[in-house]
Image (spheres, helix red, strand yellow):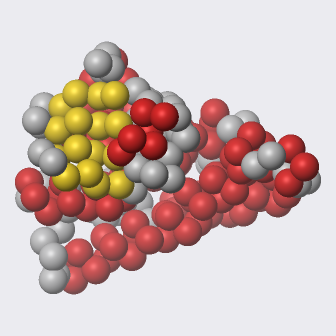
Amino acid sequence: MYTVVGATKSRAFRVMWMLEELSEEYTQIAAAPRSPEAKEFNPTGKIPALLVGDEVLTDSVAIMTYLGDKHGKLTAPAGTIARARQDAMTFWLIDEFDAILWAAAKHSFVFPEDQRVPAIKDSLKGEFTRAADLLTRHLQGPFLLGDQMTHADILAVHCINWSIGAGFPRVNDELGQWAAAMRHRDAFKAAQAKQPT
């Protein structure tokens, strides 16, 4: 059994959703970022962490990559063209979606007040909208990379959800409808309903 360290309304949700898709059992320690509980597993206080026996894995995307490889699901096999395309999509999402949202968060509540530049958020919102429009062109079927769901889909939908909570403009209708359909998956709902230990 796995243990996910991190609050549901954080990047930990990506890992929880993936574990639900994999039908793997896990418990959750709902640690907030930079809390003593989080720092117990990651000195930086960043979440999520995944406890695998005596090992502690950090970074949501690294954890999802590990889980996909270990269980042979939600990923293309390593060393294939399909995997290279999946990795390219994942890295693009980190750069063009996740990083923009994280920058907005830092200038909203993470940085000390005297280091925040609130005006930057308008620029970030514009960047995110452009990225969302580009992402729409990548929809190749029910999922970003065709007929098979990968962790890139989880990453993209989580970022879209994050953008809503952060008060960003709505993504275009096509991408919004795709994300809404993904939120109707049983595994997504199960992760949302998970009760932490």
In front: 53, or 11? Answer: 53
Above or below 166: residue 114 = below
Residue 150, position as x, y percentages in the image: 26, 56
The residue shown at (15%, 76%) is 78
In front: 179, or 18? Answer: 18
Is residue 35 shown to the viewer in this render?
yes
In front: 57, or 185? Answer: 57
The residue shown at (10%, 58%) is 70
In front: 157, or 48? Answer: 48
The residue shown at (55%, 68%) is 95
Is residue 20 shown to the viewer in this render?
no
Residue 65 is drawn in which quadrant? bottom left
Residue 183, position as x, y percentages in the image: 39, 32
In the picture, measured across the screen, residue 52 lies left or right of residue 195, that is left
Residue 138, position as x, y percentages in the image: 44, 66
In the picture, measured across the screen, residue 6 lies left or right of residue 75, that is right
Above or below 30: residue 117 = below
In the picture, measured across the screen, residue 192 lies left or right of residue 73, that is right
In the picture, measured across the screen, residue 184 lies left or right of residue 134, that is left
* Quadrant the N terminus occupies: top left
The residue shown at (76%, 49%) is 111
